[in-house]
Amino acid sequence: MSEQESQQQQAASSPSLGAEALPKVSSIPNGKRPLLPYIFVLIFLLSLLPAPLFFVGLLAPSSNTEPVKIIIPRGTSVQEITKILDQKGVLVHPLLFRAASRLLAEDNLKAGEYELGVGLSVMDIAALLRDGQSVRRQFTVPEGLSSHEIVSLLGGVEGLSGNVGAVPEEGTLMPETYVYAWDNNRAEIVKRMQEAQRKVLADLWVKRQEGLPLRDEQEALILASIVEKETGLKAEERGRVAGVFINRLKRGMPLQSDPTVIYALTEGKGPLGRALLYKDLKVDSPYNTYQNAGLPPKPICNPGRAAIEAVLQPEKNNYIYFVADGTGGHAFARTLREHNKNVANWKRVRRP
């Protein structure tokens, strides 16, 4: 074959540059298929399988059959919180809670006391701690306690932290029921009580009855503290007792209130522990309203809202005297003669 013929033959057997070459298809023996594509599909399916199980785990209920209380101290890490929860048996799996904490709260969980109900998922628990939905506790400060007594009461309230510090001024704490959470600070609770007292006093002062012999809010607070101690057993008499003291102040008469003498003896640090004696009425103290006309220099207790309101809206009456009647209340009199009869009756009731 000549060189020219050979080139022509090669050109005839090769595709032209303008034509698209067909792909080569290898022959496959009949009945056989390649395994590699199936392996890839299998791996893909296996990689998807844990995802449903993961989300099911996040929503699965815990196995505890009763509510569980937990306390998360301040500064506790997510890892430590997870350990606390796991030890209480409320987690389906610790890793699931860690994931829920990250997803829902970016690991920003709040300290506090929590009650975890039955059947909560790790998502529920993480949301609870994220939102700080802690247990709300409460305690009550009765009317008429001294500041020393209230500080002592706060010291025994479970779950509060820290110290009050210096005993607050007498009369500056509002007696009522306070809601708090675990690890709230006692000093902060005192601030709340002081703010509540300031607000109540200010609100009632602007609504006061005209013509009262009280120069300012502080004098109203002082008189309210005396009314509070005089009417501890019969609150419905507050307005009437306040009216008697208002009448005496207007006439320049000593208030002659036994609770002021008791405060002079105890300084509000606790109960007197015995009956008041006649010689006690002569104690030399600015708080002794038998020896001094007008009001004491400061309150003798922490009065409640009702006592303050009674002083600023007292009953209008002509009574000048009152004495215990043996039932927890008082017998009132307009004249000394009437009063002496009431005193004699009281002595008969008290005699064994």
Image (cartoon, rainbow, N blue to C red):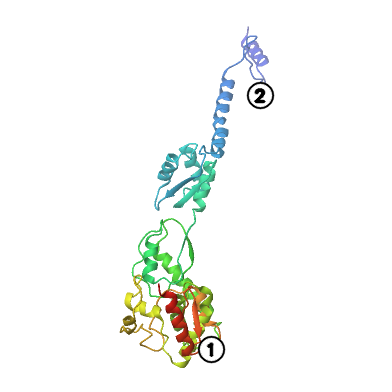
Q: Is 170 located above or below residue 177 in the figure?
A: below
Q: Quadrant of the N terminus?
A: top right
Q: Is 227 located above or below residue 26 in the figure?
A: below
Q: Quadrant of the C terminus?
A: bottom left
Q: Is 75 located above or below residue 36 in the figure?
A: below
Q: Position of residue 125 (x, y in %)?
A: 51, 45
Asked whether residue 45 is in view, the answer is yes
Q: Is residue 178 left or right of residue 8?
A: left
- Given the image, on which type of amino acid does mark 1 rest? Asn
Depth check: give the residue in front, 292 or 148.
292
Q: Residues within 10 Å of mark 2 (few under 14, many from 20)?
A: few
- Given the image, on which type of amino acid does mark 2 rest? Leu
What residue is shown at x 51% (from left), y 88% (from top)? 334
SS class, disc 1? loop
Q: Position of residue 48 (x, y in %)?
A: 57, 31
- Residue placed under numbered mark 2 in the picture: 17
Can you tell which mark lies on residue 179? none
Depth check: give the residue in front, 151 or 43.
151
Q: Residues within 10 Å of mark 1 (few under 14, many from 20)?
A: some
Viewer-nearest of labels 1 and 2? 1
CB atoms at circles 1 and 2 under 8 Å apart? Answer: no
Can you tell which mark lies on residue 318? 1
Asked whether residue 205 is in view, the answer is no
